[in-house]
């Protein structure tokens, strides 16, 4: 005699209702119940259907509940999924999965935004928070409505939780975890401080960001208030985790910015143009004018005649050195040839040649490189000052080169004697 | 007073009692209880109780393959179960006597 369908269906529903118990235990229970159900099905004969079984025994779910009560089994989890077994969606994991992974993704995205905002001090970046916020609100609505049960039931979550809760740990691991846990309250304070700091930095850059500062502080304070609830109800993660991410990102970004500005500008604070690179490719200081890097300098005398081989120094007598490039005949490329403060540099023209010597033509295939010492432009100088009456220097180009030229130093960067100040 | 209410407290004792002489599988136990006059006992409650007594170490189980239908899991009482039955039996008798006296005086 094979097991009738009605018995199998009934047992399947009992099994589902007991699904939270260990599998072996469920098997034992069903072994006890099965012969009885078969007996009943046998009595019912041909018209043994689940409905008639339910008439005799009550619903499988209440049957399971009775077994639970008599057997001293733990109560079923808060949100009983088997209740709506019939109209369960086809992909029960889909929405919880979106809720979970959008939380993770949003946290990463927010951390990146926080990093960017901390680094660049642009409050506009925080406007992008709208994007993860949409996902977070969606996820939060889901977990508030359906509880965390469906999310916790996801295989990936179960794997992680199983790992976190597994008993076989060394003492030191356990102590480390307890220690980390004890740091939690401090973390929320750090978070709020970091957010407030970020707000202050943004305000320093644009006073319009005061609103942002206020918002950040409010967000941080709410995170502190929420923290105790988080321990009891993990649904607060949908608030606390993004806040943590923003604060962590901002901390890192701010730290990176500090490091950056210190190594470049010394102790004299930070430059406002943090986006232009202040270093040449080989890590030496670059020359810049405003936001643009300066690669070459052309000097003219009062008659507009280009000057060659002039040595440049700043107000402290430091040579304004830049890497010097020269053509490499073998490869047709250019290569760095030391570092000096002699200007103007030859221009390096690079391109391709074809067999007829045409430059940059359609058929060009050979790389060529040419050093060009000509001045690429002529300077139109105002005629007003003659060299006899030295006018107060208004622009660099109209000023006659000051006489105390430093003694010509040999080419590569021997420490040039500093002019007296 | 509903008998089902009373049963809750003494179902353990009743199940142990019907397993005293002979081993039995779940449905056996249920039938014996019914035959003894405990009509009110719920099917699922008996199965749950059997599992609880088994987990408590008062019963052992063994499986007997069956020609027609699924194999049957028999429960039998071990020494611990017998001791518990004796203790609980005494408790019940004392309790019942007390109740009898109480009710005898009251009526």
Image (cartoon, helix red, strand yellow):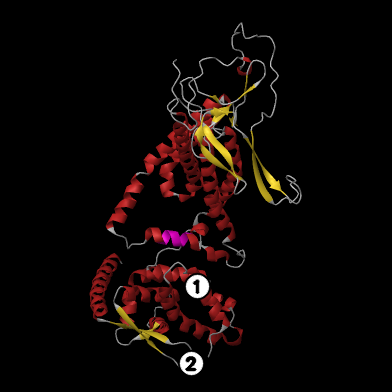
Residue A224 in picture, x, y percent from top left: 43, 38
The residue drawn where x is 37% and y is 75% is B51
The reply to whether residue A392 is in sight is yes
Chain letter of mark 2 equals: B
Residue A45 in picture, x, y percent from top left: 58, 87
Between residues A97 and A391, which one lies in front from this camera angle?
A391
| SS label for mark 1 | helix
Judge the density around disc 1: few (<14), some (14-19), many (≥20) Cα neighbours within 10 Å. many
Within the magenta stretch, is there residue A40? no
| SS label for mark 2 | loop
Residue B40 in picture, x, y percent from top left: 43, 75
State left or right for residue B23 relative to residue A327: left
State left or right for residue B31 relative to residue A282: left
Q: Which residues are magenta?
A: A157-162
Between residues B13 and A325, which one lies in front from this camera angle?
A325
Quadrant position of the C terminus of chain A in the picture: top left
Q: Is residue A352 above or below residue A341?
A: below
Q: Is residue B103 above or below residue B39?
A: above
Between residues A121 and A32, which one lies in front from this camera angle?
A121
The reply to whether residue B2 is in sight is no
Q: Mark 2 highlights which residue?
A: B68
Q: Quadrant of residue B66?
A: bottom left
Numbered mark located on residue A258 in the image: none
């Amino acid at each position: 005699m094979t097991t009738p369908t009605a018995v199998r269906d009934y047992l399947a529903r009992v099994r589902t209702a007991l699904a939270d118990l260990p599998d072996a235990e469920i098997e034992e229970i069903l072994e006890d119940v099965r012969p009885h159900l078969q007996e009943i099905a046998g009595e019912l004969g041909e018209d043994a259907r689940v409905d008639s079984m339910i008439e005799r025994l009550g619903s499988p779910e209440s049957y399971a509940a009775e077994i639970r009560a008599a057997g001293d089994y733990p109560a079923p989890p808060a949100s009983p999924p088997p209740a709506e077994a019939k109209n369960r969606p086809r992909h029960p994991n889909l929405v919880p999965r979106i809720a979970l992974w959008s939380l993770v993704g949003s946290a990463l995205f927010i951390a990146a935004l926080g990093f960017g905002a901390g680094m660049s001090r642009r409050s506009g970046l925080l406007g992008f928070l709208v994007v993860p916020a949409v996902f977070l609100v969606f996820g939060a609505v889901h977990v508030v409505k359906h509880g965390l049960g469906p999310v916790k039931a996801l295989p990936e979550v179960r794997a992680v939780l199983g790992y976190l809760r597994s008993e076989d740990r060394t003492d030191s691991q356990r102590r480390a975890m307890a220690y980390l846990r004890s740091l939690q309250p401090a973390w929320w304070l750090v978070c709020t401080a970091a957010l407030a700091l970020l707000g202050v930095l943004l305000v320093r850059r644009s006073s319009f960001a005061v609103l942002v500062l206020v918002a950040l502080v409010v967000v941080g304070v709410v995170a502190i208030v929420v923290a105790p609830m988080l321990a009891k109800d993990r649904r607060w993660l949908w608030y606390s985790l993004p806040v943590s991410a923003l604060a962590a990102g901002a901390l890192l970004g701010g730290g990176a910015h500090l490091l950056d500005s210190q190594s470049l500008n010394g102790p004299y604070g930070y430059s406002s143009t943090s986006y232009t690179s202040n270093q040449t490719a080989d890590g030496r200081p670059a020359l810049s004018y405003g936001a643009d890097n300066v690669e070459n300098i052309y000097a003219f005398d009062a008659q507009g005649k280009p000057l060659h081989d002039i040595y440049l120094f700043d107000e402290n007598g430091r040579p304004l050195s830049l890497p010097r490039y020269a053509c490499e005949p073998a490869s047709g490329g250019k290569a760095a040839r030391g570092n000096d403060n002699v200007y103007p540099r030859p221009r390096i023209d690079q391109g391709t040649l074809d067999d007829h010597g045409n430059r940059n033509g359609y058929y060009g295939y050979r790389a060529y490189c040419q050093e060009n010492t000509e001045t690429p432009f002529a300077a139109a100088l105002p005629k007003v000052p003659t060299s006899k009456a030295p006018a107060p220097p208004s622009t660099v180009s109209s000023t006659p080169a000051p006489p105390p030229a430093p003694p010509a130093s040999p080419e590569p960067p021997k420490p040039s004697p500093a002019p007296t100040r | 007073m509903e008998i089902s209410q009373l049963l809750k407290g003494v179902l353990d004792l009743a199940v142990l009692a019907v397993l005293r002489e002979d081993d039995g599988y779940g449905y056996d136990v249920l039938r014996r209880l019914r035959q003894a006059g405990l009509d009110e006992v719920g099917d699922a409650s008996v199965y749950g109780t059997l599992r609880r007594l088994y987990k408590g170490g008062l019963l052992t189980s063994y499986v007997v393959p069956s020609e027609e239908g699924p194999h049957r899991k028999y429960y039998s009482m071990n020494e611990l179960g017998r001791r518990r039955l004796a203790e609980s039996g005494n408790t019940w008798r004392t309790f019942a006597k007390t109740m009898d006296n109480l009710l005898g005086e009251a009526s």
